[in-house]
């Protein structure tokens, strides 16, 4: 059945979630274009979105719950059997060993965060706080620094790329990875404007670097030295923003004193960047009208990860580029992706992981420690793992370690749309409806002063045999005996409220129900889904939790919500916001803040930014004595996980989606290639201390000598029409080690993996 009308949805491949319009035929997506009515992407899209049918329709789509047999093969079982058996096993493990024996991994990828909210109800019933997430192998250093500077780890920083006159891209290649709205258009405008300056700090000559006014080709893993040198020039030449520092910060004297001690010349040399370039950027940044720094994995997944995040923030704070248009800012969250985990001084009640005693950051636990929590004889070990919307057996460090750990689990359950590598090694696989077969949204609504949100209506009914995650979690809670199947009084109140919004019947009934049964409160998300959800238009049931989020957001940011044109029609501003979300098929502007609101988002008690972080200043001072890395056995440095034109995490499984780079080539500098006698297309083994992968060589003069790059998101095995599984490209986490990581956050140093090449 072909539908020739354009329907609104969004792209699910990166955190930009560009608004799209698509045409469908049967269960497939046949045409894709950018949605000009989308308030933030405004018609923009990149080449990856055109291929979305490779996500929606492929041979690895699941359409039945699966149970693994002892020989590793799967049998199809009914939903009732699957959920009953899983609930029985979870209950037995929880009752015998406590909730700490159960871990949850994921809860949402690049396009789907609604399911994860309902997952929190299941975790409450299982009494486990242990959420492992991809974010805790990239951004927890950033979150931790935010907590120290701004008072809470939820104080997340935005960038002002589109409005800045001086932009520093630090360890990021937005031409490929995006990371802000309409990235390529904004980059081109920035690059072609002689009055604006674009600086790229990246060892490679990336597509973004080619557009830059200044490219600092930092040696991999030495950003801490380079950033310290930049800040050293600012402090030593007296270029700091005195007034801003006096008015808005504490601890600046201590920070400036430490920066005055930085041996700028030696650090610039260590980073491989000419001193004049360091001085030029430091002076340009300080003199700019409005500057912004946008950083990503290049500094977060390499040496001194947490210190890098601190120095990155000092760069814009010491120069006063914060809290104005075109600079870095804080923003509001409709629903925060993360929480705040207090420090040991603030609270002794934070749950550490049972075996390695890892502290959460942002309420998240790092994937790097999970195998150690499982693969041990310690009685307190993790015995059950539930994975939702993640593929850690490909994406987490140390693939083999994960595989071994999964074999030891008493229970492993993966909820996915596809038979992912993680699903292939799980005891139970639960098939989810795809992101175009259910109401979905992400909480990547991170804008300031304007913030957007997009609830996407389904394009299709769920593929037969699949269920949306909220329904999976609800049924599991019923099987666990934690919640009843039906809530007659609340369901009636929800229907009443939908007919008579001003009655506020649902809110009142819910408050009364939770008061009568306080045990239900932590499972409120699923209760709202099971009651209000049933009263919502078909296909939008999963939006139920947005009703609660809207109430809280509208209460907290009433003026900003009203400024976005949302009017209280008598039912309350929160209800009006919720209705706008349900109706706003092209996405909505949720709030419009005034610039000065940023100061009220600071969460320190004195409403100042606390610039001095003692442990970070110690690490900064210790840099001068750090020995040079020297690994004779593995002399090359591998960037394990570059974003390219044709990778999109592990969301597309069928390699046929790629137009170029089918093998995910190993990029090698011409000198290294010449030394080893390598040419384009030759096959090599890339070997690390942990493992080896094979790859096809691409001689690339954008690399630095001694540095290699392999792409992220390759190495998936996909069954062709004949059912035979073929792996395409290197599975790079076979090379990475769990202990090659930041000591505080356990963020892996994926961008600096010591390797060697062997010709095969
Ligand atoms: N096409 C595509 N886009 C994506 C994704 C995808 O899979 N494909 N994934 C999305 C996700 S989940 C994320 S987190 C983002 C990540 O987005 P980015 O962080 O921008 O992507 P990467 O290519 O991993 O790394 C960025 C740059 O860091 C550089 N780099 C490597 N080592 C160092 C170093 O030591 N110092 C510095 N300064 N730079 C270094 C690399 O050369 C690379 O150009 O991308 C998102 N967008
Ligand atoms: N070496 C190295 N490793 C890396 C990186 C790197 O640069 N280098 N990058 C890291 C980064 S930044 C990230 S973010 C991670 C990403 O890695 P993961 O967090 O594992 O996420 P994805 O690869 O996006 O996997 C998403 C899974 O969700 C499934 N899925 C899609 N839609 C749905 C749905 O609606 N419901 C459910 N239940 N499942 C769905 C997909 O089929 C897929 O199996 O990888 C990390 N791993
Ligand atoms: S920028 Fe990201 S969200 Fe937008 S079309 Fe490309 S992959 Fe999709
Ligand atoms: Mo990521």
Image (cartoon, rainbow, N blue to C red):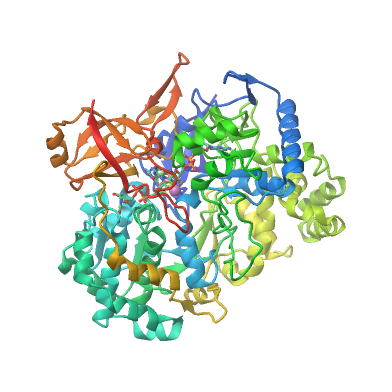
Is residue 487 depicted above or below 342 in this figure?
Answer: above
- Does 42 sit left or right of 438 as displayed? left
The one nearer the camera, 74 or 99, is: 99
Residue at 38% from the left image edge and 30% from the top image edge: 657
Residue at 51% from the left image edge and 31% from the top image edge: 420
- The image quadrant where one finds the N terminus is top right
Q: Position of residue 586 (x, y in %)?
A: 52, 49
The one nearer the camera, 551 or 385, is: 385
- Does 209 sit left or right of 499 as displayed? left
Is residue 367 depicted above or below 687 in this figure?
Answer: below
Residue at 44% from the left image edge and 45% from the top image edge: 738
Is residue 587 depicted above or below 458 in this figure?
Answer: below
Observer able to see residue 433: no
Q: Where is residue 361 in the image (x, y as percent from the top left)?
A: 54, 59
Residue at 36% from the left image edge and 74% from the top image edge: 321
The one nearer the camera, 736 or 170, is: 736
Q: Where is residue 176 in the image (x, y as percent from the top left)?
A: 33, 46
- The image quadrant where one finds the C terminus is top left
- Does 10 sit left or right of 117 as displayed? left
């Amino acid at each position: 059945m072909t539908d020739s009308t354009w329907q609104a949805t969004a792209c699910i491949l990166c955190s930009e979630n560009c608004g799209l319009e698509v045409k469908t035929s049967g269960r497939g997506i046949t045409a894709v274009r950018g949605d000009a009515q989308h308030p933030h992407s405004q018609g923009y899209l990149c080449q990856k979105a055109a291929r979305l049918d490779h996500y929606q329709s492929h041979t690895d789509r699941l359409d039945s719950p699966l149970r693994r047999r002892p020989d590793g093969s799967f049998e199809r079982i009914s939903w009732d059997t699957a959920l009953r058996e899983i609930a029985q096993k979870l209950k037995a493990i929880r009752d015998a060993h406590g909730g700490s024996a159960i871990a949850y991994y994921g809860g949402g990828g690049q396009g789907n965060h609604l399911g994860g909210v309902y997952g929190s109800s299941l975790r409450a019933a299982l009494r486990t706080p242990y959420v492992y997430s991809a974010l805790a192998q990239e951004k927890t250093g950033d979150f931790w620094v935010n907590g120290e500077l701004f008072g809470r780890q939820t104080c997340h920083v935005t960038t002002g790329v589109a409005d800045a006159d001086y932009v520093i891209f630090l360890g990021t290649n937005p031409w490929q990875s995006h990371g802000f709205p309409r990235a390529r258009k904004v980059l081109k405008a920035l690059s072609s404007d002689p009055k604006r300056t674009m600086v790229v700090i990246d060892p490679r000559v990336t597509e973004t670097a080619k557009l830059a006014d200044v490219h600092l080709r930092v040696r991999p893993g030495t950003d801490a030295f380079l950033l310290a040198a930049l800040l050293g020039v600012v402090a030593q030449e007296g270029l700091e923003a005195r007034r801003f520092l006096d008015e808005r910060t504490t601890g600046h004297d201590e920070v400036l004193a430490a920066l005055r001690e930085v041996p700028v010349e030696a650090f610039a040399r260590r980073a491989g960047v000419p001193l004049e370039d360091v001085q030029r950027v430091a002076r340009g940044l300080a003199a700019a009208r409005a500057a912004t720094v946008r950083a990503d994995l290049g500094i977060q997944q390499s040496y001194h990860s947490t210190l890098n995040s601190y120095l990155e923030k000092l760069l814009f704070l010491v120069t006063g580029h914060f809290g104005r248009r075109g600079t870095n800012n804080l923003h509001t969250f409709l629903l925060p992706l993360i929480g705040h985990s207090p420090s040991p001084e603030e609270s002794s009640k934070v749950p550490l992981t049972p075996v390695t005693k890892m502290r959460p950051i942002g309420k998240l636990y790092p994937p790097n420690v999970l195998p150690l929590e499982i693969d041990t004889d310690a009685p307190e070990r993790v015995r059950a793992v539930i994975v939702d919307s993640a593929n850690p057996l490909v994406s987490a460090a140390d693939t083999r370690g994960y595989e071994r750990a999964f074999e030891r689990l008493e229970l492993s359950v993966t909820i996915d749309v596809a038979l992912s590598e993680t699903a292939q090694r799980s005891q139970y696989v639960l098939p989810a409806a795809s992101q175009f077969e259910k109401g979905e949204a992400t909480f990547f609504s991170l804008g300031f002063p304007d913030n957007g949100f997009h609830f996407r209506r389904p394009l299709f009914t769920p593929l037969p045999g699949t269920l949306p995650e909220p329904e999976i979690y609800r049924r599991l809670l019923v099987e666990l005996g934690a919640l009843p199947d039906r809530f007659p009084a609340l369901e009636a109140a929800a229907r009443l409220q939908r007919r008579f919004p001003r009655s506020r019947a649902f809110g009142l009934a819910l408050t009364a129900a939770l008061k009568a049964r306080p045990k239900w409160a932590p499972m409120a998300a699923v209760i709202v889904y099971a009651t209000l959800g049933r009263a919502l238009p078909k296909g939008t049931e999963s939006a139920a939790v947005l009703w609660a989020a809207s109430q809280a957001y509208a209460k907290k940011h009433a003026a900003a919500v009203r400024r976005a044109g949302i009017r209280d029609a008598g039912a309350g501003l929160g209800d009006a916001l919720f209705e706008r979300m349900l109706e706003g098929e092209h996405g909505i502007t949720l709030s419009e803040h005034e610039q000065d609101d940023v100061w009220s988002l600071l969460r320190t008690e004195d409403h100042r930014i606390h610039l001095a972080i003692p442990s970070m200043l110690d690490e900064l001072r210790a840099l001068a004595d750090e020995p040079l890395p020297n690994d004779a056995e593995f002399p090359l440095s591998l960037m394990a996980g570059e974003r390219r034109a044709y990778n999109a995490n592990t969301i597309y499984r069928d390699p046929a989606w790629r137009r170029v780079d089918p093998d995910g080539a190993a990029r090698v500098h011409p000198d290294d290639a010449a030394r080893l006698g390598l040419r384009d297309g030759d096959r090599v083994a890339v070997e690390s201390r942990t493992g080896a992968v094979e790859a096809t060589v691409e001689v690339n003069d954008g690399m630095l000598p001694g540095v290699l790059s392999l792409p992220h998101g390759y190495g998936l095995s996909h069954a062709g029409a004949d059912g035979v599984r073929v792996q395409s490209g290197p599975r790079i986490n076979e090379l990475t080690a769990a202990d090659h990581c930041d000591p505080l956050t356990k963020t892996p140093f994926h961008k600096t993996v010591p390797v060697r090449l062997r010709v095969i």
